[in-house]
Amino acid sequence: MINPERMDDVVRRGAHVKPAVDAWRAVDERRRRLQGELDDMRRSRNAANDRMAKLDKKSAEFAAARDELKALSTRIKEGEAEQVRLETESQDLLLGIPNAPHASVPAGASSDDNREERVWGKAPAFSFTARDHHDLGVGLGILDFEAGTKISGARFTVLRGWGSKLTRALINYMIDLHTGAGYEEVWPPAIIRRSALRGTGQLPKFGADLFKLEMVTGEDHVPDNDFFLSPTAEVQVTNLHADHIFEPGELPRHYCAYAPCFRAEAGAAGRDTRGLIRQHQFDKVELVKFVTPETSYDELETLIAQAEKVLQGLGLHYRVVTLCTGDMSATSAKTYDIEVWLPGQDAFREISSCSNFEDYQARRAKIRYRPAAGDKPRAVHTLNGSGLAVGRTLVAILEQYQDADGSVVIPPALRPYVGGTERISPAQKPNG
């Protein structure tokens, strides 16, 4: 939830956010004006009570004062009811207003305005026409798109043989790398409640992206107990500390988690329908940080560096870009995207987003800390990044490590996880 004091900064995202900001300001102005009126009426009520205490209870003056006090009490009660309504409306409007961009975020309307920060490695040079991962995976017998569609519908895939084995190897490799850097591993549930999604900002704005579960409920059903499939482990891991106050010395906290992810809206219609790039179900290893506001941007730099280490260890060519105001998510204050090179598409494609949400999620989920013993709690800053999207890492390996005969070299860093095997060939089986 945006800090109301940051409203002037929010409009840097573009003119499209101004109506929402103006609507909130109008409600907040009415709320504050009503608060002043209620304060005045309560003072008048107290003064009327004091006067009545000095009057003869049988006098006409007392009866008139009593009637006046009764009318005043009715107005106060009505005003308090209106105040509750305005506070609820204000909170609902705040939930729909995006985060304020950090001053270092470039202005822009689309991905064309993102700023390239650095490039690592070189694109592989082939003496043949590079295939995309779809054709490579089918040729190797490791990506079964037809079976996925038959079982579950479009945008689902069955991984066979080395497809499955390399996916497990990548998950283990990533988790080992991150825990070795001091991240605490957690393995969260894949089913989450509405309140958890609201806490990280997926709701109410991105409800169309979610798979909601049909549950048998009684008359006492509470909407916050609706269940959804998780779109990203960011939700579960961030909500580990919902309604929590960190005591002095308990920050920073760094977590990593593997989780399957589910998104009902996997991309624009007709885009990326071929292959693994946009699936309804996919795997990620997620990185989440809880830190103090003073350190959060240094922590963002170490977060992106940690995600980059995965690609560097695998020898995959990539670049890092800073997303512009018009391309980053509504919850983020600043986002770096890592884009891996895909020879089959002759393009860089996103494989990780690393974001600093500042106090936006913490205010929604009530995650706070005490700077020192006895201090009033303050909102923490939360950060999140993919370390990495597993399916897209598999895609990059297939395309960057392909050979002319359709075989694929296994990156040296993964070989300890696959029994030392160095290459996948079309006729090769996972254990032979």
Image (cartoon, rainbow, N blue to C red):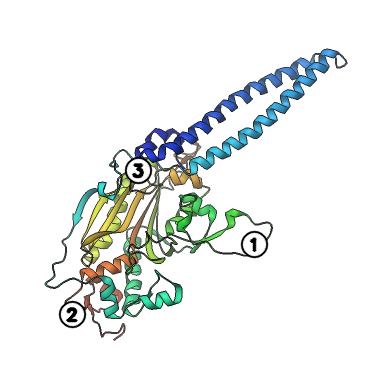
State the mark number for residue 217.
1
User: Which is more N-terminal, label 1 or label 3?
Assistant: 1
Q: Please tell me which of labels 3 and 2 falls first in the chain.
A: 3
| Dot placed on the residue nearer the N-terminal end, 2 or 1 | 1
Front residue (pair 420, 102): 102
Any part of residue 367 in sight: no
Task: Report which residue position mark 3 lands on.
Answer: 295
User: Relative to residue 106, is residue 39 drawn left or right?
Assistant: right
- The residue under the point 83% across, 17% down is 63
Amino acid of disc 2: Asp
| Image quadrant where residue 256 sits | bottom left
User: Residue 30 appears in which quarter of the rendering?
Assistant: top right
Q: Is residue 260 left or right of residue 335?
A: right
Q: How many residues crowd mark 2 within 10 Å: few (<14), some (14–19), many (20+)?
A: few
Q: Which mark is drawn over residue 405?
A: 2
Disc 3/disc 2 C-alpha distance (Å): 50 Å
Residue 419 screen position, x and y as percent: 28, 79
Q: Position of residue 62 (x, y in %)?
A: 82, 16
State the residue in front, 412 or 386: 386
Which amino acid type is shown beneath numbered disc 1? Thr
Q: In terms of depth relative to the viewer, which is nearer, 40 or 252?
A: 40
Where does residue 242 sit, x and y in percent of width and height? 51, 50
Residue 241 as seen in the image, left or right of residue 271:
right
- Residue with the most extreme left position: 127
- In the rendering, at what x and y percent does residue 88 appear? 58, 39
Please report the residue visible at 30 percent of the width from the left and 48 percent of the height from the top: 110
> Spatial distance from mark 3 to mark 1, Cα to Cα?
45 Å
Residue 68 is at least partly visible in this image? yes
Q: Based on the displayed image, in which of its 4 quarters is residue 255 positioned?
A: bottom left
Residue 53 vertical placement versus 390 (above, below) = above
